[in-house]
Image (cartoon, coloured by chain):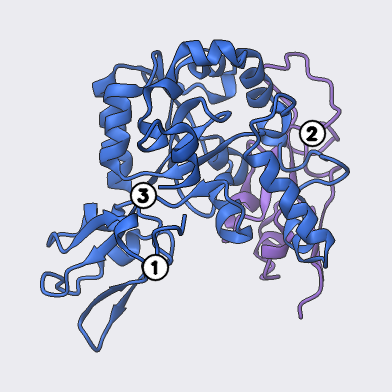
Amino acid sequence: MCEWCMKHGAGGKWYLNAKNYSDQLAKELNLEEYLMEQWMNFEKVFIRKVMGMSSIGLGYKLKMPIIGRVIRWQLERMIHSESKNRKAIRADGHFGQVIPIEDAKTIILNLAAEPIIRNYCLCRWMQRGVKDVCCINFGVLSGIIEKLPRFIPKNVKYRLDREEAVKVLEEQNRKGRVFTVWFQPVPYINAICSCETPQCGGLRLRMDFNLKTVYKAEYVAQVDPDLCQGCKTCVSYCQFGAIKYSPTLKRVLIDQKKCFGCGLCRDHCPHGAIKLVPREEIPALKNEY
Amino acid sequence: MMGKTKIIIDYTKCGNATGGIDPRTCGICLKVCDPAVFLMHPPLNVKEENPYDPQYWQITAVWLSLCTHCMKCVKACPQKAIKVIY
């Protein structure tokens, strides 16, 4: 299990701990004010200067000798901050983890605090100029997003009951989106996103700059060589470049070190040849989040 | 090693707080760029009538190190507002 399960999982996975979804926790942390400031300013998070620097040209900044390492350390500290002084305007304490659809359904059906809403994806809006209704938010965050017109979908029902939210998950899964569950801020959980690289702020920082904004899932994909027919369907669904087709073996190969454990390859395999196995059962990967 | 890339946007042509077009209705550079180097955002330090519903937007090239100088954005920009320097 990842370090956040140890800290906030109550003996299990952090995102399956009901306490992290409670209105009481949101109240204790005074989160309504915090989340309003964060969401009002969200599209500016990468351009705003924090301690004298913004994310513009981040790749170059991280490569600078010594200074680059200090910047990385500082960014990781902000992303995972549990300090009382964390700043909403730079989304301190906001990070998440990839989850397969069955865990996303468990959250929506049993854990997510009401009201549950769906809204326009912030990342795809700011990085592609596209309004896509796919993010599911819940708890106190829902009431905040409802006050910000640019995130509220037009001409669709956006307040959802649990069954409707599960239908949204299934639709996004069919499209090939990766589910991620988010602390916002840690330890309060209030969002399941349907992510797509590279137009995802969280996965951008993780995949292009190796910052731990998104952790890999508690699972990894494994292919059964006898069941795989070599149709390559899974290859086109993998957003992490973890699957390739081997013409020699006439089947696909999964690079488990690259696998984020989202389960999309399994969900779309027409032959049931791929399964997810717990990450901790694979010795070389058990601490690779 | 590749040098540092600079992407300069002429805000008199693009960005509705500075006399350019509204990128929310254009957004061609956002869509044409494979690595998604550009970001659309409300400008810093611009007074909004309703801060809950910002109406001024501009584009910044944020992820410069991921730019491959393919020049698709330069060619696609209807305002000819983008320059890529490397």
Q: Choose mark 2 or mark 1, whichever is in front.
A: 1
Please give the residue where the numbered disc 3 appears in the rendered image. A218
Q: Alpha-carbon neighbours of circle 1 within 10 Å: few (<14), some, or many (≥20)? A: few
Q: Amino acid at mark 2?
A: Pro
Residue at x-position 49% and y-position 40%: A4
- The reply to the same-chain question for discs 2 and 1 is no
Chain identifier of the residue bearing label 1 in the image: A
Please give the residue where the numbered disc 2 appears in the rendered image. B43
Please give the residue where the numbered disc 1 appears in the rendered image. A284
Mark 2–mark 1 Cα distance, whole angstroms, equals: 46 Å
Mark 3–mark 2 Cα distance, whole angstroms, equals: 39 Å
- Asked if residue A134 lies left or right of residue B72, the reply is left
Residue A29 visible at all: yes
Mark 3–mark 1 Cα distance, whole angstroms, equals: 14 Å
Q: Which chain corresponds to the colour purple?
A: B
Within the image, what quadrant is residue A83 found in?
A: top right
